[in-house]
Amino acid sequence: MREVHVSDITREIKEMVISCNYVLADDIKDGLATGVESEDDKLAKSLLSQIIENSEIAAREQMPICQDTGMAVIFVELGRKVAIVGGGLEEAINEGVRQGYKEGYLRKSVVQDPLNRENTKDNTPAILHVELTEGEQVKLTVAPKGFGSENMSTLKMLKPADGKEGVIDFVLDSVEKAGGNPCPPIVVGIGLGGTMEKAALLAKKAAVRPINQPSVNQFYQQLEEELLTKINELGIGPQGFGGKTTAIGVNIEYYPTHIAGLPVAVNINCHATRHATKTI
Amino acid sequence: MNITELTTPLKEEVTSKLKAGDLVEITGTIYSARDAAHKRFVESLQKGEKLPFDIKGQVIYYVGPCPAKPGQIIGSAGPTTSGRMDKYTPQLLECGLKAMIGKGQRNQKVIDSIVANKGVYFSAVGGAAALIAKRIKKSEIIAYDDLGAEGVRKMEVEKLPLIVAVDSNGNDFYKQGKNNYLLK
């Protein structure tokens, strides 16, 4: 067994929550740059330029790209040959979030209880997803999620007969209804199959995958491209004021499902789709 | 693209001339308030109490900024989704509020109230929080300190870049902009 101390996990999480809130990932930067080149509407072009300028100011001045520094979503791939020592994994992660949000001057947006709504003041707890993998490494992915876009996410249990067309219609309907609210251009994560909760988790995983990494399955890769084209034909455009750049990426993750079902989850992300990954 | 310069507080002669899709830059005092603050505003009005500031002719910015680093006036401060304030907005417009700054569509009740009160709804660029923070020259919490990021701030802004999203005639640029693009 390889030993990994919890303090290393806390440190990495802390650094990543800060860095990905300050500096936009390269895949997203490239997507925005492509958008500004392809846009022929004057206002759309100017809005995209402001978004790019904003990310440059944020990186240069080490301040958050967006004031909604999100609820911290953390994916952990934990090797079977790793022993976590010095404490518990979950607490180590929450401690990283706590330190990162405080030291990085990030906004604390988490309330203790959805109805009584008292702020926890340190942005914990994180939303934690742990998966056991082979080997002796710990892979940590941090994806702080703002709720302007999270609130626009949808889930529907389609019928098998609805098929690919049903999925396309539901995704387009979700993006159309979201309109300007999620700060387009957006990144769309789609989860297909599994059960209700599995589809939602797949959609989140899809949203975290870099937009320059298409699905390895050719059928789903084509569906990603088809959906991106159709979403950009909706005309919503940057900020919802019209244009061709409604989305800069569509990622799909899928999983086996039941003979009677076709769960579809659509996780919508803003132009500041933040993600960072490190392996210990 | 022409940019109209505006100074707060806003007068009806000024707001009634703005058209959906116009670019403006606002200079002067504005007040921050989002979900929890709006809830308290409306509760205060129901109890017959005063609001924490005189709302006549004023502008509310839907924002919950990041904490300021030492030496900074304010942290990143982009707009939040306005639709969540729809429930409270008509009542505030009736009390004299002249303009709101946020992002995203408003419902028909808000649009009707904007028309009835000759107000205006501006959109800031969602997510452009670092850029916007540079246009905020002063910021102090004047009410509801216990709400943290949601407290009410009095802010001085200089040339805050905005788009007229709903004008005083009820024209909605979230519909118009998209339709104009699709008709091209």
Image (cartoon, coloured by chain):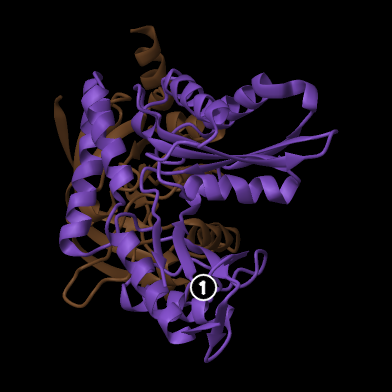
Mark 1 neighbour density, 10 Å: few (under 14) some (14–19) many (20 or more): some
Seen as rendered, the residue at the extreme right is A260
Amino acid at dot 1: Glu
Residue A215 placed where, x, y %?
Answer: 50, 36
Estimate the x, y position of residue A50 in percent, counting from the top left: 21, 40
Which residue, given by chain and number where applicable, does mark 1 sit on? A136
Q: Residue at x 24, y 18 (%)?
A: A40
With respect to residue A115, does B3 lie above or below? above
Q: Residue at x 53, y 76 (%)?
A: A120
Question: In front: B129, or A278?
Answer: A278
Question: Who is closer to the viewer here, B30 or A8?
Answer: A8
Q: Position of residue B9 (x, y in %)?
A: 25, 48
Instruction: Tell me, by letter, which chain the rendering colours brown.
Output: B
Chain A hue? purple
- What number of labels is visible? 1
**Residue B12 pos. (x, y %):** 30, 34
Q: Quadrant of the N terminus of chain A?
A: bottom right
The vertical placement of A212 against A138, above or below, is above
> Can I make out residue B85 in this image?
no
Residue drawn at x 44%, y 39% is A187
